[in-house]
């Protein structure tokens, strides 16, 4: 028996998952202590129920995904509207160093994946799939490369393996991010600012409620940026410069914000923008996790599961020992390491929601919230594509 859930019930269930997740985080000390995001908790509970219904009663539920792209793009647009050009200039050297660290992790993922694949007598392409292709690339990258391996190398099951590995990464990326940050802060005796403030200029009345006028004005900025971003993607985003849609919207939002700021025409309300961004990101991730096909993880063979577990251990060690230390050994470094773990195991959305959960408890990191979207949403995809192509030139991939 199959049920198709329309867009309205999909949104309603995502909101219910969020509410249940928030209740669980507040009531369960472990979840609260380690800042497990409410969207991950609630979404996983729903995904487990859907999986049980499929396995026990052959009830198949298909959710409507029409709102995923708008919500995702809306969130990244709010990131752009929160970006200050002066801060980006100041963070230029840090961004370059962070990029080098990220490239190192990509290479480590592929070296480990290919090496273990050969040890288990698997085609080394499976090592790439369970390396940076699925983990740092996510479901879209995994499906694209899987299809390429099927067509060009007759590697049967590559698409299914990639999707399952990406699902594994998304789950572990959301569940282990908070505990990882808590361990680093405790181990290195680091405390955050204690404030979840976004770190922008404080309004005249910091405790005043956000007015409906400011929300409407913020939505106007967001929707205009999104509309222009989608238009740019339609015109030039699918040619040689293949940036994803949300990057165009993020860039437009950043340009619009700084033009208004420099000219003094309008002062954006950072609290209103951040609130809208938090809502859109939470709903997006809740919808993504609620619709996860957890049964695909059962199809992972023993050797592949061992490779993925090894990747998890390696990445945790990498971000704790290398990312954290290279980025300054302070609270910003903890948040950057957390974000790195999130998008190297799942997606940029996972990284951002992990950081939001930790920031709500320990304090905001302006540097991390500025660099992670740029790195996780664009630069890592470019570096990943080059890394994968480089590995394909190795003699191992001729058999």
Image (spheres, rainbow, N blue to C red):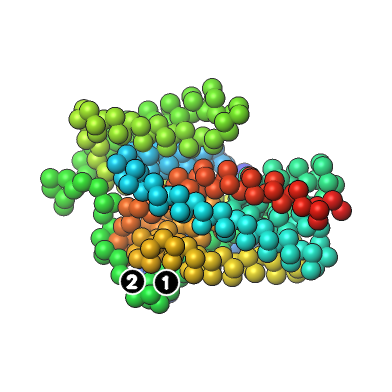
Picture quarter containing residue 359? bottom left
Residues under numbered marks 2 and 1 in contact, where contact means CB atoms less than 8 Å apart: yes
Q: Nearer the viewer, residue 272 or 101?
A: 101
Q: Which structural element holds mark 1?
A: helix
Could you tell me which secondary element the residue under label 2 belongs to?
loop
Rendered image quadrant of residue 59: bottom right
Query: Alpha-carbon distance for marks 2 and 1?
Result: 8 Å
Crowding around mark 1 (Cα neighbors within 10 Å: few <14, some 14 to 19, many 20+) is many
271 or 117, which is in the foreground?
A: 117
How many numbered marks are there?
2
Q: In this picture, is 71 found above or below 40?
A: above
**16 relative to 141, above or below:** below
Residue at the limit of the structure toward the left, as seen here: 204
Q: Which mark is residue 184?
A: 1
Question: Is residue 138 something one can see in this rendering?
Answer: yes
Q: Earlier in the sequence, mark 2 or mark 1?
A: 1
Could you tell me residue 266's position as x and y percent? 22, 31
**Which residue, given by chain and number where applicable, does mark 2 sit on?**
190
Q: Residue at x 40, y 31 (%)?
A: 252
Residue in the picture at 34% in, 43% down: 89
Residue at image location 24% in from the left, 31% down from the top: 262
- How far across and how far down the image is residue 91, in percent? 36, 48
The image position of residue 178, as x and y in percent, is 44, 66
Residue positioned most to the right: 399
Image location (x, y in percent) of residue 331: 34, 64
**Which residue appears at 74% of the width and 49% of the height?**
392
Q: Is residue 9 left or right of residue 124?
A: left
Q: Is residue 139 visible?
A: no
């Amino acid at each position: 028996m199959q049920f198709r859930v329309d867009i309205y019930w999909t949104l309603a269930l995502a909101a219910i998952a969020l509410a249940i997740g928030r209740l669980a985080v507040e009531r369960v000390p472990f979840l609260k202590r380690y800042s497990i995001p409410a969207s991950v908790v609630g979404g996983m509970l729903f995904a487990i129920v859907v999986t049980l219904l499929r396995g026990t009663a052959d009830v198949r539920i298909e959710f409507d995904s029409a709102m995923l792209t708008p919500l995702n793009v809306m969130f990244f647009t709010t990131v752009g509207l929160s970006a200050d050009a002066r801060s980006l200039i100041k963070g230029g050297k840090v961004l370059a160093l962070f990029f080098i660290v990220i490239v190192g992790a990509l290479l480590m993922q592929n070296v480990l994946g290919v090496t273990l694949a050969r040890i288990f007598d698997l085609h080394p392409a499976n090592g790439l799939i369970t390396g940076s292709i699925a983990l740092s690339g996510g479901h879209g990258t995994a499906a694209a490369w899987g299809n390429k391996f099927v067509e060009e190398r007759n590697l049967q099951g590559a698409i299914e393996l990639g999707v399952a590995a990406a699902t594994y990464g998304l789950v572990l990326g959301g569940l282990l991010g908070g505990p990882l940050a808590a361990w680093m802060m405790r181990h290195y005796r680091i405390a955050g600012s204690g404030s979840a403030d976004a770190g922008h200029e404080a309004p005249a009345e910091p405790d005043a409620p956000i007015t409906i006028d400011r929300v409407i004005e913020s939505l106007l900025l967001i929707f205009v940026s999104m509309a222009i971003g989608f238009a740019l993607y339609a015109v030039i985003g699918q040619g040689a410069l293949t940036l994803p849609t949300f990057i165009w919207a993020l860039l437009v939002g950043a340009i619009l914000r700084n033009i208004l700021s420099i000219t003094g025409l309008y002062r954006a309300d950072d609290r209103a923008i951040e609130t809208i961004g938090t809502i859109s990101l939470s709903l997006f991730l809740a919808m993504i996790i609620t619709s996860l096909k957890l049964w695909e993880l059962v199809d992972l063979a023993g050797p592949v599961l061992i490779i993925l577990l090894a990747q998890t251990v390696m990445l945790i060690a990498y971000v704790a020992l290398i990312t954290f230390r290279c980025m300054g050994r302070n609270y910003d470094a903890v948040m950057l390491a957390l974000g790195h773990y999130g998008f190297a195991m799942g997606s940029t959305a996972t990284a951002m929601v992990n950081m939001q959960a930790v920031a709500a408890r320990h304090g905001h990191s302006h540097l991390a919230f500025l660099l992670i979207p740029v790195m996780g949403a664009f630069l890592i995809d470019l570096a990943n594509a080059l890394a994968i192509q480089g590995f394909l030139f190795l003699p191992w991939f001729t058999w």
